[in-house]
Image (spheres, rainbow, N blue to C red):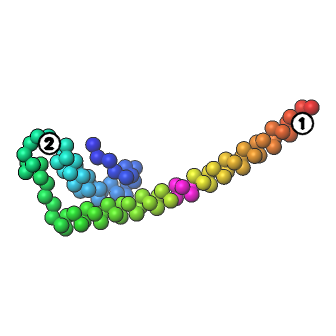
Amino acid sequence: MVATWDDSDPSNSEESGSDEEVVNLALMAMEEDTSEDESENEVNFTFDELQNAYEKLYVEYENVCLKNKSLKKNAISISKELETQKNENSKYVNEIESLKK
């Protein structure tokens, strides 16, 4: 099982394949039985591979931060709209009650 930041983003689907392989390799290495010899669990990556993976993760992190910021703004806007609708509804309920009397 591989967890990604945004499984629904089609723009990352092609380039995320190699990232998922790196993640899978790391997870498989971590999940191996700890009773085995330490050298059997060792996974070696070159500096360039690690740097490349880090850069890709950082770009993904920045994209997620931007999406999070946008979603927070959207949530605030929706909350304000909800309060406005509640106030308007309350006015109409009061008006209906006064008309019933």
The residue that mark 1 highlights is 98
Compared with residue 35, is residue 19 higher up or lower down, i.e. above or below? below
Q: Nearer the viewer, mark 1 or mark 2?
A: 2
Side of 20 relative to 84 (left or right): left
Q: Amino acid at mark 1?
A: Ser
Side of 25 relative to 64 (left or right): left
The residue that mark 2 highlights is 34
Q: Is residue 53 visible?
A: yes
Q: In which quarter of the view is residue 59 placed?
A: bottom left
Q: Which residues are magenta?
A: 70-74
| Residue sitting at x 72%, y 46% | 85
**Which residue is at the front of the view, 6 or 25?**
25
Q: In which quarter of the view is residue 17 placed?
A: bottom left
Question: Which secondary structure lies at badge 2?
Answer: loop
Q: Amino acid at mark 2?
A: Thr
Q: Is residue 21 visible?
A: no
On the image, the x and y values in percent for residue 3 come to 32, 47
| Residue sitting at x 28%, y 63% | 54
Q: List the single residue furthest toward the right.
A: 101
**Quadrant of the image containing the C terminus:** top right
Badge 1 density bin: few <14, some 14–19, many ≥20, Cα 10 Å? few
